[in-house]
Amino acid sequence: MTMIYWCNIISAKKLFREFRAWCPLCIHDQLTKYPLPYEPLLWTLEGVRVCTIHNVKLEDHCPICKKQTPYFHCKSPYAFCVNCNAFVGDSRNLIAVQNNNDLDLSNCIGRLITYEKKGAQPNSTTFIEKVGRYIKKNYKSNLSEFSKAIRVPEREVINIFCEGQTPRLETIAKICTHMKKSLHQIAK
């Protein structure tokens, strides 16, 4: 699984989280079922706040010392805090998803990763043109109203649709979720 197929559409800016995030239930499942547990790519991406398997909020603070773990650390054992060595797969204080928007975004981003790549890579020009037509039709070209609808700062929307800036992953996921279409459906 990779994001390389989407490199012409998605900005590398804020693509990855600064700090590790994880689902304690997934960690527990992996450690009991597999000899070599792994950290899913989905957890590393900015905008993913929910485990799409267990529908719980991803954790990003150690349950013991309450500190965050940077992604690139000289000692970064999977499933353990680098600050206090505590196991982070404890599922006692999990927060169930209250906001379907977060679950929808996580699912949308997950579909991007697992999409079966066929044909030429999509490009940002097609994506921006199609979304621009959608904005014109549904929002009478009002970028301010569209930015409110997708919960993205107006300046960012203007940068994308007026100045040709490549959108961030989370913004693309919000647009796709709002339009109820996959990125591939919009960008092809």
Image (cartoon, rainbow, N blue to C red):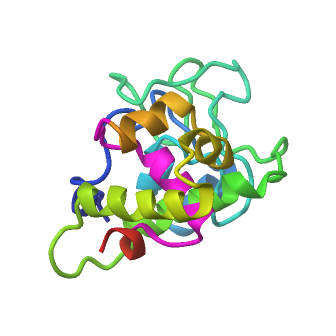
Residue 159 placement: quadrant: top left
Q: Residue at x 82, y 46 (%)?
A: 95
* Residue 152 locus on image (x, y percent): 58, 38
* Residue 176 locus on image (x, y percent): 52, 62
Nearer to me, 168 or 42: 168
Residue 172 vs residue 81: left or right?
A: left
Q: Residue at x 15, y 74 (%)?
A: 120
Q: Residue 172 colored magenta?
A: yes
Q: Which residues are magenta?
A: 163-183
* Residue 124 locus on image (x, y percent): 27, 55
Q: Residue at x 55, y 32 (%)?
A: 154
Above or below 42: residue 153: above
Residue 183 placement: quadrant: bottom left
Residue 76 vs residue 57: left or right?
A: left
Nearer to me, 39 or 134: 134
Nearer to me, 15 or 75: 15
* Residue 153 locus on image (x, y percent): 57, 32
- Residue that protrudes farthest toward the left in the picture: 120
